[in-house]
Amino acid sequence: MATDLRNKLRRLGVHKGASKIPRLPLQPLHERGARTEGLESLVDGLEIDTPYGPAFVHEDVFPVGHFHGNHTLGELLTLSPEVAAQIGGDASLALIDLGRALFLDTETTGLAGGTGTFAFLVGVGAFNTENATFEVQQYFLRSPAEEPAMLHALAQRLDAHEAVVTFNGRGFDMPLLRSRFTLARMRPRLLDAPHLDLLMPARRVWRGRLESCALSSLEHHILNVQREQADVPGFLIPEMYVRYVRTGDASEMPRVMYHNLLDILSMVSLSTRLITLFAATASPTLDTGADDWLALGKWYDDLARTADAEAALRKCLAARPDPSTRAAALFRLGVILKREGRRDEAVRVWEALSESKTWPGIQACVDLAKHYEWHTPNLERALAWTREALAITPALSDDTLRQRCGTELQRRLDRLAFKHGRNRRNL
C-alpha cells in the first residue's frame, strides 16, 4: 500500500528527499542502522538529531507549477498580503511575504484538548522560492516518548518563518501546540507570529450555500480536489494512531500521512481562492457565481467597504441568481442605498424586492410605506404598500414570524388609515 502511495505521489509530480532543504541536520535512516520493520519500512523518512534524541521526518517536494485542484501552488506567490490581512482580520499579515508563510496542520490523539492530548503528526509546508518548489515536512511520533525531540526539531522549522496559515488553527492546532511546547519548556517565535486562519473567511463566503465548511467539503465543492482511496476520514485518525502505538503495526500510518499532506496542499489552494475572491471587484472578468458575489457583498458591507459592497451585489444580480439569492442581494443593496441617502435608487430596489413572497419582500413593502409616509408624502401609496405587505405575510413558513409580522402590519395599517381619514377631514 505504501508503494502505491509513493507511485501516486510521483505521478503528481512530487519529488522525495531533503537535498533541497538544508536548514536542518538530516541523516538517512539506513545510515544509522535503523529498523527495517514498522513505520520506516513503509514511509521514506529521515532522522533529525536533537538534544532529546532522534526525531522522524518525512519530506515531499512539489514544483510551484503543481496543480492542486483549480489552482497551482505558486499562484499564491503572486497575490497581495494586504488582502490576506483583510480576510484574516490581522493587520500584521499585510507586512509579511506570503512566500515566507508556513502552512501547518496537525493530527492528534483526540479533539478534546487538554494536557492528555498531543499532536503525533505535525505537517508543515512552505515555499522555497530559490528552487521554485513547495516543500512539506511531516514530523511523526513513532513513540510518544519522542515528543521532546519532535518539538525541538519542529521549533527550528517554525522559527524560520514569518507567519502561519492554518484551517481552524486558531481554535485548535495552535493552542494545542502552544501547550505542548510550554510543557516541554520551549517557545517557538511563530506561536505569536501573524496568523491566517482560513476557517472563518471560508465560512463567511460559503456557509450560505454549503451544508458544511469542513476542509473536505470545500475541497469537493470549491477547489475541485479529488482525494485518492489512500485517504482516511479524519475522525478515525486518533484511534488508528492509538492502535499503532499499542501493536507496532504501522500499516495504516501512510494513509494518515497522506491525509495530512493533502490538508496542507488544500490550504495553499484555499488561500489562493479566498484572496483572489476577496479582490474580485478589481477583476471584472473573474468567473464568480451569484452566491459568491452575495457573500462578498455582505462581507464588504460589514467592513464598511460600501463601494465594493454595492459593486458585488450588483454583480450578483447581473448573474441571474435564484429567487432566494436575488432577494437577499436586493435587501442588502436597499439597506446600503438607504444608508447612503440615495432614496430614489432605494425605492427602485424595494419595488423589485416587493415581488418576493418572503420576509425581505415584506420588509421592502414596509420601507416603501415609510418612504411614502414620511419622505415623499402620499398616504394612499403608504396604505397600499402596507396592504401588500400584509398580503405576503400568510406565505411565511415560520409561525412565530408570520404572527409577529401580521400583528405589526395591522397596527401600521390601522394607524395609517386613521391618519389618512383625519387628513381628509381636515381638507
Image (cartoon, rainbow, N blue to C red):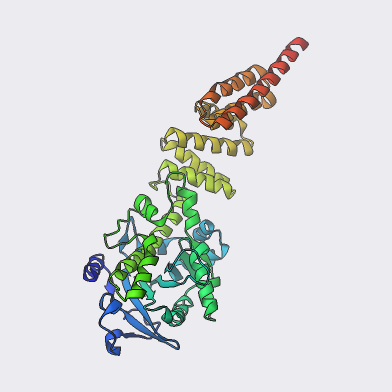
Give the x, y percent position of residue 95.
53, 67
Placement of 27 over or under 190, stated as above or below: below
Q: Is residue 246 visible?
A: yes
Placement of 174 over or under 272, stated as above or below: below
Say whether residue 259 is left or right of residue 306: left
Placement of 307 over or under 68, stated as above or below: above
Q: Quadrant of residue 267?
A: bottom left
Give the x, y percent position of residue 54.
39, 85
Residue at the image position 27 percent from the left and 73 percent from the top: 15
Residue at the image position 42 percent from the left and 81 percent from the top: 146
Give the x, y percent position of residue 181.
52, 77
Closer to us: 103 or 278 = 103
The number of numbered badges drawn on the structure is 0
Give the x, y percent position of residue 50.
43, 86
Quarter holding the C terminus is: top right
Quarter holding the N terminus is: bottom left
Q: Residue furthest front?
A: 246
Q: Is residue 96 visible?
A: no
Q: Residue furthest right?
A: 426
Residue at the image position 75 percent from the left and 14 percent from the top: 422
Closer to us: 301 or 3 = 3
